[in-house]
Structures are given as C-alpha cells and as structure tokens.
Amino acid sequence: EAQVTQNPRYLITVTGKKLTVTCSQNMNHEYMSWYRQDPGLGLRQIYYSMNVEVTDKGDVPEGYKVSRKEKRNFPLILESPSPNQTSLYFCASSSATTSSYNSPLHFGNGTRLTVT
Amino acid sequence: GENVEQHPSTLSVQEGDSAVIKCTYSDSASNYFPWYKQELGKGPQLIIDIRSNVGEKKDQRIAVTLNKTAKHFSLHITETQPEDSAVYFCAASISPKAAGNKLTFGGGTRVLVKP
C-alpha cells in the first residue's frame, strides 16, 4: 500500500530536549515536505526537499532542521524544542520534480507534539 | 508571498443540503488550486483540484469553480452525507518548477453534516 509513515503519532517532551520525528514514504517520490498545522492557520510549510541531499526552507523554518540522506526518508529534527513548537506536524510527499508542475501531495497521519 | 483566505471557518448543514466553501488568493500568478479533506486523526487527502485554464471541474457530488478575475475559488458539495463531515482546506500555488509543490493553504473549514 502506498503510504507516508510518520513516527511517533504522539510526543510529549520538555523544553530544550532534542527530538526527531521520522518520515518515510514507499512511493519513490522525489519531493518531500514537512508542515505544521495550527488552528485557524491551516498548514504551513516548514522545509521541503526536491531530492536526496537537496533541502530548502519553507515559510516557518525557524527552530527546525531536516536531512535527506535517502530518497524514502525525511526526518524532522528539533534541536531545542520550545512551547511555541507545540503543534500537529505532517510529512508529505509527491511525484513533483524540478521538471514537472504540481502533483498531489500524499500526507502522513500526523504527529501531535506537545512541548512543556 | 501568496496569501489564501478561507471562509467560513465552520459550516453546519443538514444531510442532503449543499455546502459551499470559498477561498480568495492574493497572487494573480497562482495557477493551481487543490482542495484537501482531513478526517479526524488522519492527514489531508486531495479530493479535487483545478488549474487556471479551467473555470469549473466536477467529480460526482463535488465541484470546484474558479474566478481568476476576482481571484477566488469555491468548493461545492451537493447532497451532503454524514461522511462528508471533516475539515476542508483550499490551497493555491504558483508552481514554479524549482519549488515543486509550493502550496499556500487556507485556514480550513470544519464541516458538520447533521443527520
């Protein structure tokens, strides 16, 4: 089954304790992205990656890091989480490439993060 | 950058009635407008999309209309059913090739279909 898998689904942590949210897709997609969802603000892009070793900032990248060492994986790293990073996070992938236009995004089921 | 506004934020309809969600966008260069449906505990899923060279698109009970002059687009759901209850997001994209899926999302509409 084609899917985007995020782990964990729920995470409660304390300020300053480094954490990683994993994301994996099995559709051989080149494009992957991270979003955060907050009430009334919709989904805002954090980082995206057009291919292995190619990443770029989205609209709200502050406080986050990503890496793309393999095509299927795109982990989101919070080096020093703060309470304002409490949110619902989604990983997504698509078949979009640098030579093609928009393609539908396939989302994971989300990670609800609480930072106290 | 692009800004997308979505209204209403909540919508309650009686089963069988129609539901309409409206979005406006700011950048006249936007040319791709998808709609996503998010069910409880799940990620958003694409339900329909429209490109700027088309004014209307239908898929069974859902339709999307686009008015490029006014820079707004709408989602229409006819004969609503309880399974239509979800959060709906509109989005817009300029689709520059180098940025791939650069979507700007609206704030979402929570739709409740009452039996």
Image (cartoon, rainbow, N blue to C red):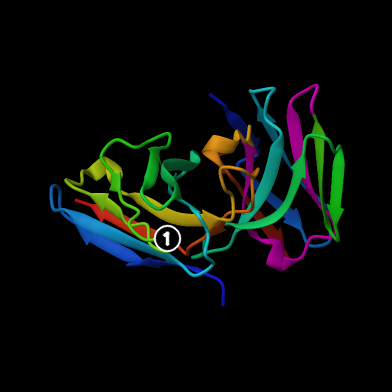
Give A64 or A98, whichever is nearer the viewer. A98
* Side (left or right) of B53 relative to A62: right
Q: Relative to B12, say whether B21 is above or below.
A: above
> The residue marked by circle 1 belongs to what chain?
A
Residue B79 sits inside the magenta stretch: yes
Give B30 or A97, whichever is nearer the viewer. A97
Residue B39 on image: x %, y %: 58, 63
* Side (left or right) of B105 relative to B22: left
Quadrant of residue B53 in the image?
top right
Q: Residue at x 57, y 27 (%)?
A: B2
* Side (left or right) of B9 relative to A8: right
Q: Residue at x 65, y 56 (%)?
A: B46
Q: Residue at x 31, y 51 (%)?
A: A67
Q: Residue at x 16, y 45 (%)?
A: A80
Give the mark count: 1
Amino acid marked by disc 1: Lys
The residue tagged 1 is: A71
Residue A17 on image: x %, y %: 13, 53
Span colored in magenta: B68-92
Classify 10 Å Cα crowding around label 1: few (below 14), some (14-19), many (20 and above): many
* Side (left or right) of B110 relative to A9: right
Under circle 1, the secondary element is loop
| Residue at the outermost left position | A16
Residue A82 sits inside the magenta stretch: no
Give B40 or A6, whichever is nearer the viewer. A6
Q: Relative to A32, say whether B67 is above or below.
A: above
Give B18 or B6, whichever is nearer the viewer. B6
Quarter of the image containing the N terminus of chain A? bottom right
Residue B64 on image: x %, y %: 80, 45
